[in-house]
Image (cartoon, rainbow, N blue to C red):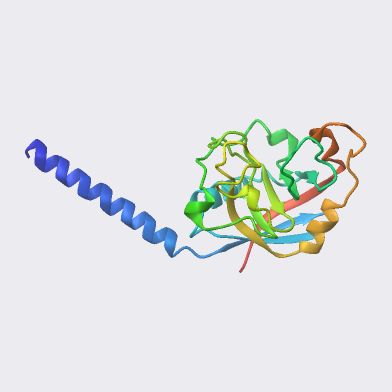
């Protein structure tokens, strides 16, 4: 086999693999997950078609049990982010403390201008620092949050965050968590947004759609 023929065959195989993956993602069915908290249940519907990598990342933490016995530990309200010129409203959850150092590799950011999933009321998204650093932290939007979309400047890099689903049941619970007691008497954003005590999450598991 000549080198040029080998390269053509390799390119064709790569194209076929990518096309199959794209077709599979487009045909992927939504996945539902129940988050059981001490304030009630929240059911999420994850969009595996539009955000396949972020959904897969979230589900591997779910299936590994890392979110079980975790918490909602942060509430961001209009009155507890004095250091931020661009304000948002979200609640943020994380893994069980014993699993904090046992996670998976960070994932690449699936930007909202590519996925088409915007940060509307009830949308679920991944927490991050730098663009490709999301691991296990995730949050739920309360009211529309366009500054979290691509081009929004809540994160100064303007790349936005990776939305990957939405709440389909339990927004009343989300709002209860947002209004739970926090360290609002502190002076810094980080301390003011800390839920005290955090809201316990018993289990996070898949449910039938």
Left or right of 110 in this view: 119: right
In the image, farthest residue toward the front? 85
As rendered, which of 33 and 186 lies closer to the eye? Answer: 186
Q: Quadrant of residue 144?
A: bottom right
Q: Position of residue 161 (x, y in %)?
A: 59, 46
Q: Position of residue 41 (x, y in %)?
A: 77, 60
Left or right of 75 in this view: 22: left
Q: Quadrant of the C terminus?
A: bottom right
Q: Name above or below for residue 10 compared with residue 39.
A: above
Left or right of 133 in this view: 171: right
As rendered, which of 130 and 57 lies closer to the eye? Answer: 130
Q: Quadrant of residue 172?
A: bottom right
Is residue 202 in view from this perspective?
A: yes
Residue at 70% in and 60% down: 121
As rendered, which of 77 and 54 lies closer to the eye? Answer: 77
Q: Position of residue 139 (x, y in %)?
A: 69, 48
Residue at 65% in and 30% down: 101
Left or right of 125 in this view: 27: left
Q: Quadrant of residue 206?
A: bottom right
């Amino acid at each position: 086999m000549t080198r040029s023929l080998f390269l053509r065959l390799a390119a064709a195989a790569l194209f076929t693999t990518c096309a199959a993956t794209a077709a599979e993602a487009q045909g992927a069915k939504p996945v539902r997950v129940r988050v059981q908290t001490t304030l009630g249940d929240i059911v999420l519907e994850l969009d595996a078609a539009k955000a396949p990598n972020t959904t897969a990342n979230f589900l591997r933490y779910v299936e590994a049990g890392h979110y079980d016995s975790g918490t909602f530990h942060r509430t961001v309200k209009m009155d507890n982010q004095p250091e931020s010129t661009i304000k948002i409203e979200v609640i943020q959850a994380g893994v069980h403390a014993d699993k904090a150092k046992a996670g998976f590799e960070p994932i690449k950011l699936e930007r909202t201008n590519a996925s088409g999933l915007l940060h509307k009321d009830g949308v679920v998204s991944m927490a991050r620092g730098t663009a490709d650093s999301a691991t296990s932290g995730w949050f739920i939007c309360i009211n529309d949050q366009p500054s979290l979309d691509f081009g929004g400047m809540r994160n100064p890099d303007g790349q936005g965050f990776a939305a990957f689903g939405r709440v389909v049941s339990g927004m009343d619970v989300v709002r209860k968590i947002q209004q739970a007691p926090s360290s609002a008497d502190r002076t810094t954003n980080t301390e003011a947004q800390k839920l005290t005590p955090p809201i316990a999450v018993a289990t996070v598991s898949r449910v039938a759609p």
